Structure formats: C-alpha cells, structure tokens
Amino acid sequence: MPNEEYLMFRTNAEKLIKISVMGEIASPTIRSVYNVSATGKPLVLPGVGGITYNLRVGDPACGWEADHVEPGVSVENKENDARSGQAANTAFNVLSCVGNEATVVNGDAKGAKGTVTGKHGGIEHVLVDFPAEALEKLVLGDRILVKAFGVGLKLVDFPEIKVLNMDPMLLEAWNPKPKGDKLEVPVTHIVPAAIMGSGLGSNQVNSGDYDIQLFDEAVVEQYGLESLRLGDLVAIIDADHSFGRIYRQGAVSVGVVVHTNCVTAGHGPGVTTLMTSPDGKIIPQINLKANIASLLKLRADI
C-alpha cells in the first residue's frame, strides 16, 4: 500500500483488489515480411513478441533497426474456448498494471521476479521487465504470474484526475505534488496531441497504447522527442483519456513509453495511459529522471 504521508494526498488503495492473472511468453510474429515505411521504402525488421535481450526500459526508444519492438518480455494469455474467446487475455491486459510484480512459475528461471512496464494494443501484449540474468534463463512459452493490483485506483482529493493502469507503488515512487486543485506531475517530455497516431479513437484506455508519430522533423526537434526512452513518463497536451483517446483542448494525459519507434505511417513509440484530466488539472513538470526504470529501481545503471 502507498504511504499516504509520503504521497501528500489520499488514495483508495486499501479498497483495491489484488488478483492473479497469468500469461506465457509470446513468440515473435511477422504478419508481412516487408514493413513499408511512411516514405514508401520496404524494410525487413524485428517487431513484436519474444524475449528482447538487449533492450529494456531505460534504453532509447528511437534509433534501432526495429519496428514496434517490445522491451524485455512480451506476455499474453493464450487460453481460448468457444464461450469466452479471448476473454482471458483481455482480463490479463486490463487487470495488469504498470508496476505490478510478475513471477516466473516454471522452467529454468522459475521464481525470478519482474515488473510490468506497459501494455501494447493491437497485439494485446503485457510487457514485463526482468533482470538480465533472468532473461538468459527464460524461454518462449514460460508462464508468468502477475499479481494484478491497481484497477480502480482513485485520487480522493482530485476527483477530476483519473488514474488508470498503475500500481499504487508506482504512484508513490512517482510522487506528484498537489498545487491547489491541480497536481504537478514529473515527466520527461511534452507531446502535442496533433502528432498522436495509431490507437487514437479507442473507446477505452484500460489496455493497450497509442503512438507518438515522429515523422515531422521540426516537431521532433521542437519537443526534443529524439531523446525519448522506453519507460519515460510523458505528458500529452490537449488529449483526454477519460473514456477513450480523444482530442480536447486544455486536457492533459500522462503515460509511459512502452515500445520502440516505428517506420510505418501513423505509428511511433507507444504510450500506455496512467493519468488523465479533461480540464487540465495536471501540470507537467519536466524532470529527466521521470522514467520507471529509475523510479522503480529496475536497473542499477539508470
């Protein structure tokens, strides 16, 4: 449970349910051999799925020979029956929250502990970071138990700010500061809603992500987006995520960067929503250390 005195405001964390959800490490997939870039160039690149040995939260989101690559371990629940279809994987994605503890339950890495770092829509993966030594022991198909905790989290004193997809312990480590009826929230970057792409228009933000398009060089330079890192907490201006992802002037939404940049039109580094205010009650404060790899102490070198 979060320390309320440390947070400087009240939450309802003591009323939240902690529940088990399970998935297995998903194989990389290639739907089409060629990815066609936004400039019409065909490219063959690694993408979603698998165990990514040399890319973790804290690493750059841009500059890789890659498209939509997910850091660490990509996990999905493959349970499927005639009655429920993909309901188990939907629950896995919705109930898992960034900051949740994940445990390997079989194989050579049995007992290894990891941390949920994001959710990737479309492919519907939950992304989990593990220490490097655990990554070397994992294999595709290993099963991962997540202690899902955070759905329903509320800021009691800030009813106009909605919290989603976040373990209360991440909120404590992040430590936003009250300022009147608003909340000052540390972020590494400001992102204009005008460049948000794939995922825009979804009718819910309790799973998945949406992408920061990086095809306009002037905008990328203006907002310093070439320095985006996986795990960065970023503020999207004029974006309301209260029930879906929409453009609304004055709104502010904050999320975590979950996958790498992309070459395909409409895509880019993905952002899973953590906090939103339709009325601008969130005040972004630039802090280059506002990255979950640092806040949750996932890496000694960050």
Image (tube, rainbow, N blue to C red):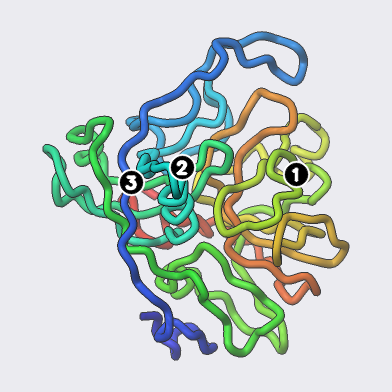
Q: Quadrant of residue 284?
A: bottom right
What amino acid is found at the position of numbered circle 1 in the picture? Met
What amino acid is found at the position of numbered circle 3 in the picture? Gly
Work out whether residue 82 or residue 27 is closer to the camera in this orientation and state it.
Answer: 82
Q: How far apart, in angstroms, are the residues tagged by discs 1 and 3?
A: 29 Å
Query: x and y percent of residue 89 in the render?
Result: 43, 48
Q: Earlier in the sequence, mark 3 or mark 2?
A: 3
Work out whether residue 118 or residue 190 is closer to the camera in this orientation and state it.
Answer: 118
Work out whether residue 286 or residue 108 is closer to the camera in this orientation and state it.
Answer: 108
Q: Earlier in the sequence, mark 2 or mark 1?
A: 2
Query: x and y percent of residue 220 in the render?
Result: 75, 38
* Residue ID at (88%, 62%): 249
Examine the rendered structure and indicate whether residue 148 appears above or below residue 124: below
- On residue 23, which mark appears? 3
Mark 1 lies on a secondary structure that is loop
Q: In the drawing, does residue 38 fall left or right of residue 8?
A: right
Query: x and y percent of residue 272 in the render?
Result: 58, 52
Residue that label 2 marks: 125
Q: How far apart, in angstroms, are the residues tagged by discs 2 and 1?
A: 20 Å
What amino acid is found at the position of numbered circle 2 in the picture? His
Q: How far apart, in angstroms, are the residues tagged by discs 3 and 2?
A: 9 Å
Is residue 117 something that shows in the picture? no
* Residue ID at (36%, 39%): 73
Query: x and y percent of residue 197 in the render?
Result: 74, 40
* Residue ID at (46%, 51%): 87
